[in-house]
Each structure stands twice: as C-alpha cells, then as structure tokens.
Image (tube, grey):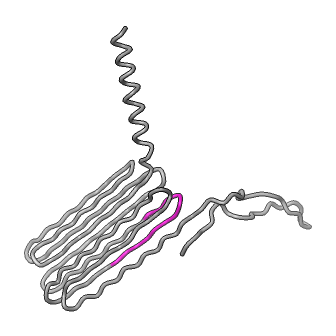
Amino acid sequence: MKRLTLIAATATAFLTLFALSTTPVSAQSAGSWVDMMPGNAGAGANASGLIQIAKSKSSSKNGVDFGHGFGLGVGPNGIAISNSIGVGGGPVGAAHNMQLNIGRNGTHLSHGGVVSQGGNRRVIAGGSTGSSNGRVYGGSRVTGYGQNTRAYSKSHTRRFQPTSQPAYYGSGTSNRGSVGRVIRGGFRRFGN
C-alpha cells in the first residue's frame, strides 16, 4: 500500500510539473538562413512551438553552391513559417527568404532577396518570425559582397485587438420587415 501511494504521489508530482512547464509554450517562432560563397555553402533553420520542424541542406559540387533552410513552428496562438534558399556559381550568387506568421493577435509577412556579381560573390539571406507575449514580430535580412550587388527587403506586420462589441446585434426595420444588421466585425486592425 505504501508503494502504491509513493508511485501515485510521484506520478501526480510529475504530471503537475509537466502541465505547468507546458503552459507558457504558447509562443511559436521560425527562422532560417543561407550563406553562399565561392566553394562553400551553408544553411540553417530553427523552430519553436508545440509542433516544430526545422530542416536545412547545403552542398557545393562542380562549382555550384546550393543551400536551403526551412523552419515551421505551430502553437495554440498560430503558425510561423520561415524559408530561405540560395545558389551560387561562377561569378554570380543569389538568395531569397520569406517569413510568414499568422496568429490570433496579428500577421507578419517579410521577404528579401539579393543578387551579387563579380569579386567575392558571397550572398547571405535569412530571417525570422514569431509570436510572443501576445505580439507578432519578424524581419528579413539580406547581404551581398560582390562588386555589383542588388538587394531588397520588405516587411509588413498587422496587429489585431479584439473589440468589446459583439459582431451582430440589434435589428432594424424597413418597409420589408425586420432585417438584422452587422454592426462591426470581431477584430480591429491597428498599425500598417
């Protein structure tokens, strides 16, 4: 009997600690990067959340460098995706990345690209996105080291805040009888 009580107490303590430790894991995030330089290629990825997938692959064969990084994090507040890809060969290197986060409290989309030619044609592209403490965040970074480099990066984040008004209420009357009206949706958009 004492042994069963001890086992039950241990199991209860373990389950309580497990439940408490998984409660704050409501944030999700994902990130990825690629780094292409003559004769070398690198790629990486990371993810956090209840579901996590992070994969990367890079190779340098026959004068062609290739890299790809992908991260996916899914949590109770949404989904975060990050993808980066790059290639280089001869005097030219190119890379691109994209981050997407869709959650309860907002959305984020960012992407960037770079093409570098001549000299050291090294290109680096990467970014990350996530949700933490009720806020979405993210960004894209690209860099090129060649003599002729063109790069861009764009980012857009929208935050949502629940309204206190219900989505449907009241009824209006017209000569056609009683007609329900939609007054306001369930979310307001703040920011750009």
In the shown orientation, is residue 121 left or right of residue 190?
Answer: left
Q: Position of residue 101 (x, y in %)?
A: 44, 63
Indicate whether residue 111 is drawn in magenta.
Answer: yes
Residue 109 x/y as whole percent: 43, 70
For the point 41% across and 48% down, which residue is it? Answer: 25
- Quadrant where the image shows the C terminus: bottom right
The outermost residue toward the bottom is 148
Residue 165: percent from the left, percent from the top? 72, 58
Residue sitting nearer the eye, 53 or 155: 155
- Quadrant (top left, top right, bottom left, bottom right) of the N terminus: top left
The answer to whether residue 133 is left or right of residue 180 is left
Name the residue at 33% across, 69% down. Answer: 127
In the image, residue 86 lies at what x, y percent?
23, 74
Q: Is residue 128 left or right of residue 94?
A: right
The chief SS type of the magenta part is strand
Which residue is pictured at 44% across the width and 59% down the height? Answer: 131
Q: Nearer the viewer, residue 21 or 44?
A: 21
Q: Quadrant of residue 71?
A: bottom left
Q: Which residues are magenta?
A: 101-112
Q: Quadrant of residue 21?
A: top left
